[in-house]
Amino acid sequence: MNAVEDVSAESYYSNDTATFGDRVAAAREAIGLSQEDLARKLGVKVKTVTGWEDDVSEPRANRVQMLAGILNVSIMWLLTGEGDGLEGPVDETALEANVHDILVDMRRLKGDYGRLNDRLGQLEKRLRAALKNA
């Protein structure tokens, strides 16, 4: 496990744990763009995007603004890791527990629905019998 995986989800992309390049790559991947796609949208070469993501170079201010718009994150988040950006990785264990709880609730509701449906049928029969006898 590397240092980035060891950090809580709240600060996963913070300035302390991820670089500008890490945030660019993560945001790009989150919206399903390749480096080639991003380079084309920005009007730069692929090696330029690679340089940003590898933290060997930095974009000019106007490119940072364009990056934020294309990646649907705030400029502040790209630069510092604070503000509107990506959340950290999903906790798989918590997700599995949540899915399990939802399935248990669904089974319980299905059982409740069956009992209520039976009760509704009984009431309908009583109502029909009462109307016949009236």
Image: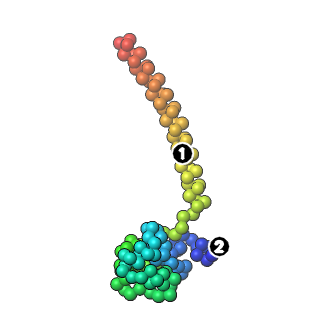
Q: Which residue is found at the position 42% from the left and 82% from the top?
A: 45
Q: Nearer the viewer, residue 50 or 102?
A: 50
Task: Name the residue tied to disc 1.
Answer: 105
Q: Which quadrant of the figure contains the N terminus?
A: bottom right
Q: Which residue is found at the position 55% from the left and 41% from the top?
A: 107
Q: Quadrant of residue 108?
A: top right
Q: Which residue is found at the position 47% from the left and 30% from the top?
A: 117
Depicted 24 relative to depicted 107: above or below: below
Q: Nearer the viewer, residue 83 or 42?
A: 42
Q: Which residue is found at the position 37% from the left and 79% from the top?
A: 42
- Whole-angstrom CA distance, mark 2 to mark 1, is 35 Å
What amino acid type should be assigned to the residue bearing mark 1?
Answer: Asp
SS for callout 1: helix
Q: Position of residue 113 (x, y in %)?
A: 49, 35
Q: Nearer the viewer, mark 2 or mark 1?
A: 2
Depicted 105 relative to depicted 28: above or below: above
Asked if one can make out residue 79 in the rendered structure from this viewpoint, the answer is: no
* Disc on the earlier residue, 2 or 1: 2
Task: Name the residue tied to disc 2.
Answer: 1
> Tag 2: Cα neighbours inside 10 Å, few (<14), some, or many (≥20)?
few
Q: Residue furthest right?
A: 1
Q: Position of residue 52 (x, y in %)?
A: 47, 83
Q: How is the image coloured?
A: rainbow
Q: Which quadrant of the figure contains the C terminus?
A: top left
- Residue 111 falls left or right of residue 77: right
Depicted 133 relative to depicted 15: above or below: above
Q: Nearer the viewer, residue 27 or 87?
A: 27
- Residue 77 falls left or right of residue 91: left
> Tag 1: Cα neighbours inside 10 Å, few (<14), some, or many (≥20)?
few
Asked if one can make out residue 121 in the rendered structure from this viewpoint, the answer is: yes
Depicted 27 relative to depicted 104: above or below: below
SS for callout 2: loop
